[in-house]
Image: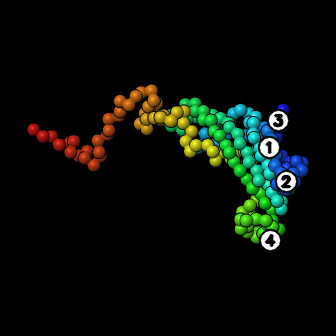
Amino acid sequence: MARTTSDFDLAGLRLAAGEGRRLDLWTRIDPLELGGESYAVSPAEIPVSFEVSRMTGHGYALRIRFAATLEGPCMRCLKDARREVEVDAREVDRPTEAGRHAPSARIPVSASGEELSSPYLKDEMLDLASWARDAFVLAVPAQVLCRAECLGLCPECAADLNEVGPEHRHEQPPDPRWAKLGELKLD
């Protein structure tokens, strides 16, 4: 059975340079707030395919893949919406000493090594839950809709345009600039 974890100790794998592993882990993603609305992520325990490779000269190449469902109000009509979100995220962490480039790096690295430093890895301890949450948020569509063709709500009366149909209309108020012409009496 897979392990549920929020933090994962990469040092415990004891990988040699060039060696890699694939693990099946489980993690949680807390509810999200998007556009002022709360969205749940299901299932509560998400199965994650985790791949880790030890790079030559220190460092890790990491990859997670998983799928989860985002549940909450549709951003157009406010009815229940469910969207399946697939995540495939990669991270690289290659520590360097100040003022030196990584010994076998082919990519230029700044003196501080920030360009190849993962915010989710510290002292070979991976914050899997934070990485999974951030990767999930980046994969969520810009608009969470109940269906792609959702028409939303009428801006005048808040009627659900999916139910009232395309013939739903409101009489436009007269332009106030022309109101005085309505007072004219023509015989």
Residue wearing tag 1 = 22
Q: Is residue 167 left or right of residue 69?
A: left
Q: Residue furthest top?
A: 163
Q: Earlier in the sequence, mark 4 or mark 1?
A: 1
The residue lying toward the viewer, choosing from 182 and 166, is 166
| Gap between marks 3 and 2 measured at Cα | 21 Å
- Does 46 sit above or below residue 106? above
- Does 143 sit above or below residue 80? below
Q: Amino acid at mark 1?
A: Arg
Single out the mark in the foreground, 1 or 2.
1
Q: Earlier in the sequence, mark 4 or mark 2?
A: 4
Q: Earlier in the sequence, mark 1 or mark 2?
A: 1
| Gap between marks 4 and 1 measured at Cα | 31 Å
Residue at disc 1, secondary structure: strand
Q: Residue furthest left?
A: 187
Q: Amino acid at mark 4?
A: Arg
Q: Position of residue 10 (x, y in %)?
A: 85, 50
**What residue is shown at x 77% (from left), y 57% (from top)?**
93
Q: Quadrant of the C terminus?
A: top left
Residue wearing tag 2 = 124
Q: Amino acid at mark 3?
A: Ala
Q: Amino acid at mark 2?
A: Glu
The residue lying toward the viewer, choosing from 113 and 105, is 105
Residue wearing tag 3 = 2
